[in-house]
Image: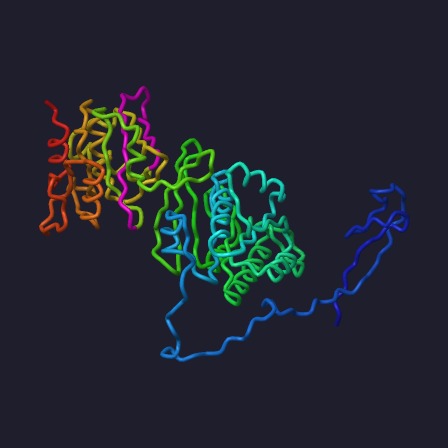
Amino acid sequence: MAKTRTKYVCSNCGRQSPRHMGRCPQCGEYNTMNEVVEEVRKAAKQDRRPTGVVRASAQRLRDVTSDAGERFFVPVEEFSRVLGGGLVPGSIILLGGDPGIGKSTILLQLSAVLANEIGAVLYVSGEESTQQIKMRADRLGLEAEDLYLLAETNLGNIFEQVTRLDPAILVVDSIQTTYTDTLESSPGNVSQVRECASRLQALAKSTGLTVFLIGHVTKEGAIAGPRVLEHIVDTVLYLEGDPFQAFRLLRSVKNRFGATSEVGVFEMSSLGMVEVPNPSEAFLAERVVNAPGSAIAVTMEGTRPLLVEMQALTSPTAFGNPRRTPNGVDMNRLLLISAVLSKRMGLRLHEQDIFINVIGGLKVSEPASDLAMAVAMASSYYDRPVPADLAIVGEVGLSGEIRTVAQLPMRLNEAAKIGFRRVLLPKTRRKLDDIPPNLELIQVRSIADAIATVVPRE
């Protein structure tokens, strides 16, 4: 039995309404809304695969080659690091980040570079006109003969341009503004985002086209739309940074063709996103030497060691409940370290407001920065500076013990390369190999030993 749908149409002005109304809200006439019953026809199923897709057939494991093809060379070294060494043909990459963080800027720069290196690039924008994109390109000094711009949100029209131009790279800004005519929902709807992403994935896998998608984020910082969007794509990148700082971190949280948790560092300037080849030196450039409450932590971001300055400020509280204000570190880690210092060291931190800040807008999450945070807090509490040539690495346990961390040789070599002469680290039984000969290692077992060594009270 065919399904029907009832609606009411004004015989005077043609206004439609899903329910009966005695007076037409548009023309104001009475008793003109007439009932109309129409049959609802179900749309025929359509093949969602792009034109030219060949149906796959099963293969034996031994017959499948593991060669995924050569990667595209990416001249932007920091971007290439995050991708795992270059672009894989047929991959689909999702880039997310807060509004105004620089997502469109960095992909427009990358598109111009790739257009000059590997061939045609189609940049599709659903949020800006081609004139606006051109103005940004002129401001950034970008020139590319094979970079094509398209202001379009209809997925069918985008596929037509892909067929006509046959580009090597497709950039869609953004997936939340793209829609397909086969669905009646509005752009940005869960079903629209899922359907458009699925079709773009099928296009990439069948033709070898590399696709970049820009995604909006929610107020919690996650990619907006269905969670399946992150499952569909091959790589998920996040562009992070403090809006009041110049540094931006490009972080990989999913990568089917490389290591996850890799980080590329950029600096926002008048020329767009500029690579920072030595982030440790950039983060320590404005450091005030011999200032109480400052300590240098040696952290790892993916496979890259980074030296960052952690600042702490303890001040007698004027209220009953002292404040704990972290910036760049997790609140729970701050509460844990302050509790250990109070219990194991006898510091009266319950009477102190504590502020922690990681310089450069970075977010440090690994436990290897615990010891540097504790030393910075003790340094501010006693108002005594930490030696300027000392770097710190180590995890703090609840008993006050200092635990070892992974990849110590890489951390120590990075500290020596920047110019530090001493490193405070956990005492370990294993012999450390490949240690710079001019680097002094200060090994401690407990938080009490560490603070007594580097922050003497007399």
Residue appearing at x 86%, y 50% in the figure: 14
- Residue 445 in sight from this viewpoint: yes
* Depth check, front residue: 8 or 49: 49
Residue appearing at x 58%, y 68% in the figure: 49
* Depth check, front residue: 381 or 207: 207
Tell me where residue 334 appears, x and y as whole percent: 28, 36
What is the quadrant of the C terminus in the image?
top left
Tell me where residue 139 appears, x and y as whole percent: 53, 36
Q: Please name the colour scheme applied to the rendered image.
A: rainbow
| Res 280 quadrant in image | top left
* Depth check, front residue: 365 or 72: 72
Q: Is residue 95 left or right of residue 153?
A: left
Tell me where residue 156 appears, x and y as whole percent: 64, 59
Total numbered badges shown on the rendered structure: 0
Chief SS of the magenta region: strand
What is the quadrant of the N terminus in the image?
bottom right
Does the magenta run of residues contain 115?
A: no
Residue appearing at x 69%, y 69% in the figure: 44
Q: Is residue 426 left or right of residue 294?
A: left
| Res 73 quadrant in image | bottom left
Residue segment shown in magenta? 303-328
- Residue 444 in sight from this viewpoint: no
Tell me where residue 338 appears, x and y as whole percent: 24, 33
Taking 47 as reference, is 72 above or below it?
Answer: above
Q: Residue furthest top?
A: 318
* Depth check, front residue: 114 or 228: 114
Residue appearing at x 46%, y 47% in the figure: 222
Does the magenta run of residues contain 322?
A: yes
